[in-house]
Image: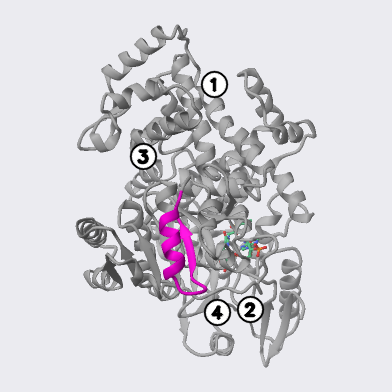
């Protein structure tokens, strides 16, 4: 089997692309396709060409791994597309699986498109910080209209073949054998002339308002990003310029977007997310168990949110509480959440009832005896957790996974009270657990490979991005956020306003800065942790400015007042009393106040994450720097187009990060210093580790 097979079906030539797993347009594919077109052109007996994908899909687009190659070495998708568009004999794209990015662009340059009913097609380039660069911005609006094309290109989400048929993007849906029907279709249209070329169509009657609205929209959905604006400009050109002009401009803007740090960041995240799913030592053959039922202990905010993930995936849940009132309250919250989603039209009331019917409330822990997985989600107290796991050990069936949702406690210690520590794992959901996509999967010393592999598969099934981490205080995400929180408080001691710190992070693209986030999480949580840690270490009672705010009863959003004030709209507003409290605090402690630039604030906050991240890597708590980036994007709102904190540090240059840390009087972590001295990067460290 060659990378592009040529098979003759009488007067039709079928070109099958065989580049598993997703038939990306990698080196070798254009050569194979050109050879096919040469053959078709040179043989009078061939009247039409069908292009089809071998394996599970059509073409998933340009090969993202080739984006960093010099232009002359990268596969020439645009060159192939130009030839396809001008090809003198009819061409038919036969689509199954997905036709994405360059894949859909190939299909759009064909004269006809047929697709299986379950196929999907889209232009997801925006998710990689680029734009459809092989004619997509010029052809899609000419077929489906500007409005729909903008929607598809700006969201990057694919549409189903059935919708594509209604939009005229697909000429025929196929129920039976795709190849056979595509060949028949090609034969039927073999003599049609002139050939229908999308590039020859015109777009008319589009109000300029459409583009104005789209520009306003991306200010909210893609704040600070480059490529969405380019996409709108290019779509607009379809209404004002001939195809050839838009086609050239598209090439120019594609290169500008591709070579931007934003695209490098997003591409890094694309691969990091996929790498995160790979665990050294585990293979496809590692046995997993099928999770058919779940038990959850605790019907509070966390337990309820976790339950919803399972119910959404159709997995029955038994939820346990200690008192009827708490149980009823927990259930009511779940129902209300679902009903609110239904009000927004994203669920039907039938769906709501179906999900609720999968939920069994109980006060009796023994009812968990049949559950395939049990997740404990009670408050953070080692004594309580040990007590629960001792009971679970007696109740749970053999082979059941016993998971804790602890965000800080030692999973090894929790596992030690059971007679089956190999079945114990940490599953750290992030609040709100039904919304946040991150799941830290905490591998304890004795967690079995099978439990780990099952947990990873389960994460995917319930729509989470699972990342494996090791046991330490706060695991990866919270351990880093504690350092960041400390730094944020110090910035305020030195003279910054809380709103300065938040504004710096908002400018970087984080929806919430450190103090907006603390107010949302509840200031009392951090307060209690600090008090507890001081007590355990025999240190005096903490008395920072933030502690004093909490002691005034300002606990954050939930009390309408924290570092900021909150009204009905939940928008933070600076409070004069807090400003005075901070000023008094500085005066009392003899702290000199100075003006801090946004640059200093940004560097100190982000590099505090990077520095702790490097230490975490060195200790083996995270497997890869890319894993840390995935954690920060899905768990803490770090913007993907910045590449996550570690990717961001790579982009800045580790030497510069070390120099900045030293300038601010901080000690760079040994791994960070070493990589900087070697001229290395975190991405390079990940690569070297994966090859070791
Ligand atoms: C483009 O087309 C630009 C043009 O407009 C202009 C050019 C001039 N390249 O996700 P999975 C790998 S931009 C290279 O786990 P799934 C992936 O890394 C492109 N590699 O599978 C993974 O490798 P590994 C626009 C790719 O079934 C393996 O394939 N297209 C590419 O869950 C399996 O992937 C896109 O953005 C690629 N294009 O999902 C589509 N795609 O096994 C991006 C995948 O070593 N791809 N790989 O970890 C996807 O959205 C999903 O991969 C897809 C399959 C839905 C196709």
Labels 2 and 4 touching (C-beta < 8 A): no
Check disc 4 and report the residue beneath it. 193
The residue mark sitting in front, 4 or 3, is 3
The residue mark sitting in front, 4 or 1, is 1
- Residue 196 vertical position relative to residue 579 in the rendered view, above or below: below
Q: Residues within 10 Å of mark 1 (few under 14, many from 20)?
A: some
Q: Earlier in the sequence, mark 2 or mark 4?
A: 2
Q: Residue at x 26, y 28 (%)?
A: 553
Quadrant in which ligand 1 is drawn: bottom right
Q: Residue at x 64, y 18 (%)?
A: 663
Check disc 3 and report the residue beneath it. 521
Q: CA distance from mark 3 to mark 1?
A: 26 Å
- Residue 429 vertical position relative to residue 177 in the rendered view, above or below: above
- Residue 612 vertical position relative to residue 94 in the rendered view, above or below: above
Name the element at disc 2: loop
Q: Earlier in the sequence, mark 3 or mark 1?
A: 3
Name the element at disc 1: helix
Where are the magenta residues, as a range? 386-406
Q: Is residue 401 magenta?
A: yes
Q: CA distance from mark 3 to mark 2?
A: 47 Å
The label on residue 668 is: none
Check disc 2 and report the residue beneath it. 55
Labels 3 and 2 touching (C-beta < 8 A): no
């Amino acid at each position: 089997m060659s990378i592009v097979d040529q098979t003759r079906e009488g007067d039709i030539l079928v070109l099958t692309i065989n580049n598993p797993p997703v038939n990306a347009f990698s080196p070798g594919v254009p050569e194979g396709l050109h050879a096919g077109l040469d053959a078709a052109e040179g043989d009078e007996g061939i009247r039409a060409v069908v292009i089809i994908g071998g394996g599970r899909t059509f073409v998933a687009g340009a090969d993202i791994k080739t984006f960093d190659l010099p232009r002359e070495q990268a596969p020439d998708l645009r060159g192939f597309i130009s030839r396809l568009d001008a090809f003198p004999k009819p061409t038919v794209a036969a689509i199954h699986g997905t036709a994405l990015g360059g894949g859909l662009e190939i299909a759009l340059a064909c004269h006809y498109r047929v697709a299986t009913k379950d196929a999907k097609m889209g232009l997801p380039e925006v998710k990689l910080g680029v734009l459809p660069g092989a004619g997509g911005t010029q052809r899609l609006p000419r077929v489906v209209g500007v409005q729909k094309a903008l929607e598809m290109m700006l969201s990057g989400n694919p549409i189903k073949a059935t919708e594509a048929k209604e939009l005229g993007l697909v000429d025929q849906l196929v129920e039976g054998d795709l190849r056979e029907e595509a060949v028949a279709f090609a034969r039927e249209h073999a003599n049609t002339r002139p050939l229908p070329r999308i590039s020859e169509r015109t777009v008319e009657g589009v109000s300029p308002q459409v583009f104005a609205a789209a520009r306003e929209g991306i200010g909210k959905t893609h704040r600070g990003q480059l490529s969405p604006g380019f996409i709108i400009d290019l779509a607009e050109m379809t209404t004002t310029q001939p195809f050839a002009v838009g086609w050239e401009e598209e090439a120019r803007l594609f290169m500008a977007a591709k070579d931007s740090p934003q695209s490098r960041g997003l591409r890094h995240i694309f691969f990091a997310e996929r790498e995160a799913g790979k665990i050294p030592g585990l293979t496809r053959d590692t046995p997993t168990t099928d999770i058919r039922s779940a038990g959850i202990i605790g019907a509070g905010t966390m337990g309820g949110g976790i339950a919803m993930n399972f119910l959404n995936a159709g997995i029955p849940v038994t939820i346990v509480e200690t008192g009827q009132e708490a149980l009823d309250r927990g259930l009511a919250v779940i129902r209300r959440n679902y009903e609110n989603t239904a009000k927004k039209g994203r669920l039907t009331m039938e769906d709501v009832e179906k999900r609720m019917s999968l939920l069994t409330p109980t006060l009796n822990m023994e009812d968990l005896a049949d559950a395939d997985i049990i997740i404990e989600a009670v408050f953070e107290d080692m004594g309580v957790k040990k007590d629960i796991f001792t009971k679970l050990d007696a109740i749970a069936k053999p082979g059941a996974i016993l998971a804790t949702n602890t965000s800080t406690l030692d999973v090894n210690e929790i596992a030690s009270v059971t007679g089956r520590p190999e079945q114990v794992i940490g599953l750290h959901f992030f609040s709100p657990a039904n919304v946040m996509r991150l799941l830290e999967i905490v591998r304890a010393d004795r967690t079995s490979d099978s439990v780990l592999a099952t947990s990873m598969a389960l994460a995917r099934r319930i729509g989470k991005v699972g990342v494996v981490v090791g046991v330490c205080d706060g695991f990866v995400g919270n351990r880093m956020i504690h350092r960041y929180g400390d730094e944020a408080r110090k910035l305020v001691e030195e003279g910054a306003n809380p709103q300065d710190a938040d504004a710096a992070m908002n400018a970087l693209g984080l929806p919430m800065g450190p103090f907006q986030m603390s107010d949302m999480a509840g200031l009392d949580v951090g307060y209690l942790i600090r008090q507890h840690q001081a007590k355990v270490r025999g240190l005096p009672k903490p008395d920072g400015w933030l502690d004093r705010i909490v002691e005034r009863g300002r606990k954050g959003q939930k009390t309408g007042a924290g570092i900021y004030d909150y009204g009905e709209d939940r928008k933070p507003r600076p409070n004069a009393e807090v400003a005075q409290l901070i000023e008094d605090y500085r005066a009392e402690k003899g702290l000199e106040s100075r003006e801090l630039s946004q640059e200093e604030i940004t560097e100190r906050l982000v590099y505090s994450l990077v520095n702790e991240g490097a230490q975490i890597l060195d200790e083996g708590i995270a497997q890869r720097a890319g894993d840390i980036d995935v954690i920060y994007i899905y768990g803490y709102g770090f913007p993907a187009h910045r590449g996550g904190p570690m990717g961001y540090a790579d982009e800045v240059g580790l030497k510069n990060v070390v120099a900045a840390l030293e300038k601010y009087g901080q000690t760079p972590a040994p791994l960070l210093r070493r990589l900087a001295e070697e001229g290395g990067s975190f991405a390079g460290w990940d690569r070297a580790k994966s090859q070791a």
